[in-house]
Amino acid sequence: MEIWVPYGDVESLLTVQAENLGELVDPAPEGHVDELAPIVEERMKGHDALIVCDYKPATAKLLRVLAAKIPQDGAVKVLSPFPKRLEDAVPELKGRVLKTSAHTVAISIEGAGEELIVKAAPEVTEAGSRKLVISTGEPDPLFGYIDSRAALCTSCMTGAWRRAYAGRDGDDPAFFVETKAYASILEVAEKVQGATFATIVTRGGEPYSLIEGGARDARAAYTEQQPSPAKGIVVGAGGRGYDETFSHTLRLAMGALRAVRKGGEVVIIGECRDGIGSKAMQMQSMGRISDSMLRKGFYADGMEEIGYLTRLRDHYSVTLLSSLPDLYAAGRFRFRTARNSAQAFERVFAAAGRGAKLHVFTRAPETVLAAR
């Protein structure tokens, strides 16, 4: 059986024999972009800024339809932390996307210690302006679900991620629940005056629906899966917009682990063309984080990912199919690596047995696994 898994801007071909395929978790491409665009257009009325927090395919597809409806006279500013990437994804907005300012202002949050002060671009906090904030949602082990509120805080603010980490309840990954970390970051988002939030839910990488809330609203838009734990799983991070970095790929892969037995084989597919990702993982890859630093409460953005990495290494045998140099993938992170899917499967079956069953998740961000 031939299965295509998103990998950066292209797809990776997996050839799985019928006797080896357990379940294929492959969300059907049910796009509703033409139905969602008029809804967003209506919500834009009365707003003078559109803040776009990512450049994922679903966000880009929706904006390509909306581009002609956004006034070109600057009456509605289009703002993004990643203007070049957004313009590459949406050529119709070329030359019209402004970068959120690097100059920051502090957001005062009652009860927050001085070390947890959050700062944001002035365009985000500007009083008197009406802002529509939009992003594509995705499951996340720290926040439960990253909606447009969380995306605004993590992409346009400094200190928000640290506040969420400090407010978390334990280090176990939690998906599609409203975690304490999300509650902490929600306090920050609520300080942004004049903001309206819209989050895109996807199916098959296509815009499927719009939600206003967080994990609870998102979960209702997903189809829940309950595959029996197998000897191995293959997890696709989702391609462009999801697998640019190792740390993002790692976060998304954690949500599929209920489908594999402890000690089982995990193949993670993600291009990682932009390298390692979060500051914490970069420091980890260079050996700059020690156990003593962790005991003393040292923090860098993405600190929770060190725990996710440890969990993967301790409980599973992991093969990474990516463009990440072996110096990091195999050397620092101690994963097995593969040049292509055939080599990855060869190593999986050598360890798990030729008759092993594999579950294949083509798009981790669209996967909800039922608790057992």
Image (cartoon, grey):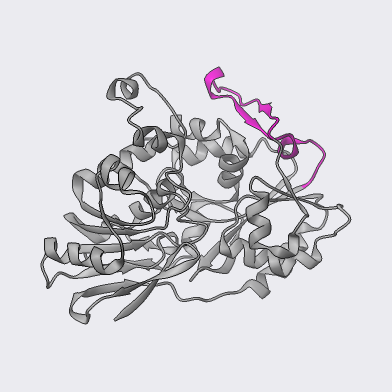
Identify which residue is drawn at 53% across, 76% down.
30
In the rendered image of this protein, does residue 232 appear above or below residue 79? below
User: Horizontal placement of 2 versus 314: left or right?
Assistant: right
Identify which residue is drawn at 66% across, 66% down.
62
| Residue most extreme to the right | 73
In the rendered image of this protein, does residue 161 appear above or below residue 59? above
In the rendered image of this protein, does residue 9 appear above or below residue 124? below
Image spot of residue 369 (x, y percent): 34, 61
User: Horizontal placement of 247 versus 319: left or right?
Assistant: right
Q: Quadrant of residue 328?
A: top left
In the image, is residue 86 part of the stretch drawn in magenta? no
Q: Quadrant of residue 280?
A: top left
Q: Quarter holding the C terminus?
A: bottom left
Q: Is residue 289 visible?
A: yes
Number of labels in the image equals 0
Q: Quarter holding the N terminus?
A: bottom left
Q: Is residue 229 visible?
A: no
Image spot of residue 130 (x, y percent): 78, 46
In the image, is residue 103 part of the stretch drawn in magenta? yes
Image spot of residue 311 (x, y percent): 26, 43
User: Horizontal placement of 14 versus 54: left or right?
Assistant: left
Identify which residue is drawn at 36% across, 57% down.
322
The part of the chain drawn in magenta is 102-130
Taking depth in this image into account, of 234 and 153 the one nearest to the observer is 234
Identify which residue is drawn at 63% across, 40% down.
156
Image spot of residue 8 (x, y percent): 47, 62
